[in-house]
């Protein structure tokens, strides 16, 4: 019988992320993504060579995305991805970053199970669950979801960025353009047919169909699916992240405020690891490739060498020193969360700012 499973496309932009690439791809193939459209720019660690090899192996489509990038390389990549044949062939599309891992709780942990749980959905916003640093200083060549298993509580009203989502959507022409957090350019004639459901299976109001990029505060949005966001990683990796800059804005430094607003480690969450029996053989197969395996090792060495080089500069020595001095963030008491959320809702998110305009929001 013919395969009736939908084609699910993940769109990714990377720079110097070769050390994490195999683990990320293996996880998302096990989750049910059938296609990957990956853009690379300005790579010094061999990420682009890894992607070429992965393309030759039939794992993905690789597109080089050289600058200049006035609004950041990710936005240029999304412009190109919008018109790419890989998108035209997809049934569902999701824009992701290398530090984001889809974690399906429904059924067997795959996209097929998620779609079966929400058969009427045309879009499913996947709300971030922030995973903190947990005091890990040294970068290790080990799968990120296995290293970082502590994160924010399921319900948290502040910071508001904890409620940001990435949208898995049925790519049927209802939206013309891809955006960082949500599809853009809705076709007015198709909006009446939109049915958006949150990660716990609740149908969402029409405001989500055209504008929203964050879930409602104070709700558990993770009943069926969540998006594990490992924004910090090891302290050494964070230093390299600061050196790299943000993908959706060319020149924007990562500082201590970014760290503090994401470094939550109060709750243990190992649910993503139930896919490990499916992920492990995929990862091992890629590592065993005679070309890809050595390229991965080169990317790992590059990260370690780059960190040592950055430690020659006072700014980066000071940054990692501050990271070691700063304790994990603790969720604010409910009353204080409500106080801040009350003021944030109106002034920070007028309708004109709830779109996915170019901004540093990751």
Image (cartoon, rainbow, N blue to C red):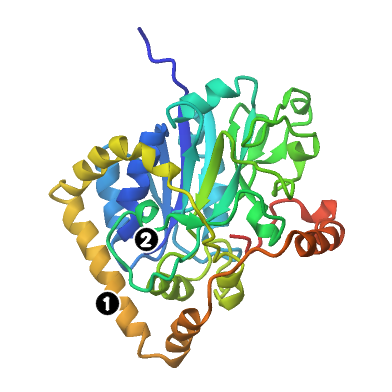
The residue sitting at 53% across, 31% down in the picture is 92
Determine which quarter of the picture holds residue 162: bottom right
Considering depth in this image, is 304 or 103 the residue closer to the camera? 103
Q: Is residue 90 above or below residue 166?
A: above
Quarter that holds the C terminus: bottom right
Quarter that holds the N terminus: top left
| Crowd around label 2: few <14 · some 14–19 · many ≥20 (10 Å) | many
Image location of residue 243, percent across then percent down: 45, 76
Looking at the image, residue 268 sits to the left or right of residue 191; the answer is: left
State how many labels appear. 2
What SS does tag 1 mark? helix
Q: Which mark is residue 157?
A: none
Q: Is residue 114 above or below residue 255?
A: above
Looking at the image, residue 153 sits to the left or right of residue 14; the answer is: right
* CB under 8 Å between discs 2 and 1: no
Inter-mark Cα distance, 2 to 1: 14 Å
Q: Is residue 195 above or below residue 178?
A: above
Considering depth in this image, is 69 or 224 the residue closer to the camera? 224
Q: Please name the residue that numbered disc 2 is placed on.
A: 17
Point out the tag, 2 or 1, that comes first from the N-terminus. Answer: 2
Farthest residue, direction top: 1
The residue sitting at 54% across, 20% down in the picture is 116
Image location of residue 285, percent across then percent down: 20, 41
| Crowd around label 1: few <14 · some 14–19 · many ≥20 (10 Å) | few
Q: Which mark is residue 305?
A: 1
Looking at the image, residue 99 sits to the left or right of residue 164; the answer is: left
Image location of residue 326, percent across then percent down: 53, 79
What SS does tag 2 mark? loop
Q: Is residue 251 above or below residue 159?
A: below
């Amino acid at each position: 019988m013919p395969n009736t499973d939908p084609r699910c496309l993940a769109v990714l932009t990377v720079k110097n992320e070769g050390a994490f690439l195999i683990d990320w791809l293996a996880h998302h193939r096990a989750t049910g993504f059938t296609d990957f459209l990956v853009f690379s720019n300005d790579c010094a660690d061999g990420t682009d060579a890894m992607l070429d090899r992965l393309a030759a192996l039939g794992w993905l489509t690789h597109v080089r995305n050289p600058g200049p990038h006035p609004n950041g390389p990710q936005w240029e990549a999304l412009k190109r991805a919008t018109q790419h044949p890989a998108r035209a062939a997809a049934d569902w599309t999701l824009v992701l970053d290398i530090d984001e891992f889809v974690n399906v709780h429904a059924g067997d942990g795959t996209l097929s199970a998620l779609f079966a749980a929400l058969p009427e959905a045309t879009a499913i916003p996947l709300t971030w669950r922030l995973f903190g640093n947990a005091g890990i200083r040294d970068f290790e060549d080990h799968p990120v979801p296995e290293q970082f298993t502590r994160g924010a509580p399921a319900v948290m009203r502040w910071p508001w960025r904890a409620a940001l989502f990435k949208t898995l959507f049925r790519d049927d022409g209802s939206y013309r353009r891809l955006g960082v957090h949500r599809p853009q350019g809705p076709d007015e004639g198709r909006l009446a047919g939109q049915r958006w459901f949150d990660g716990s299976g609740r149908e969402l109001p029409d405001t989500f169909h055209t504008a929203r990029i964050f879930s409602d505060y104070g709700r558990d949005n993770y009943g069926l699916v969540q998006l594990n966001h490992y924004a910090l990683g090891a302290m050494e990796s964070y230093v390299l992240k600061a050196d790299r800059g943000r993908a959706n804005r060319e020149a924007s430094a990562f500082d201590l405020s970014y760290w503090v607003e994401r470094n939550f480690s109060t709750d243990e969450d190992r649910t993503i690891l139930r896919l490990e029996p499916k992920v492990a053989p995929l990862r091992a197969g890629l590592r065993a490739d005679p070309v890809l395996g050595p390229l991965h090792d080169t990317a790992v060495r590059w990260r370690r060498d780059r960190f040592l080089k950055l430690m020659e500069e006072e700014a980066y020595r000071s940054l990692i020193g501050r990271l070691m001095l700063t304790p994990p963030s603790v969720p604010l008491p409910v009353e204080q969360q409500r106080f801040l959320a009350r003021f944030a809702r109106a002034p920070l998110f007028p309708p004109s700012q709830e779109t996915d305009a170019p901004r540093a929001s990751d």
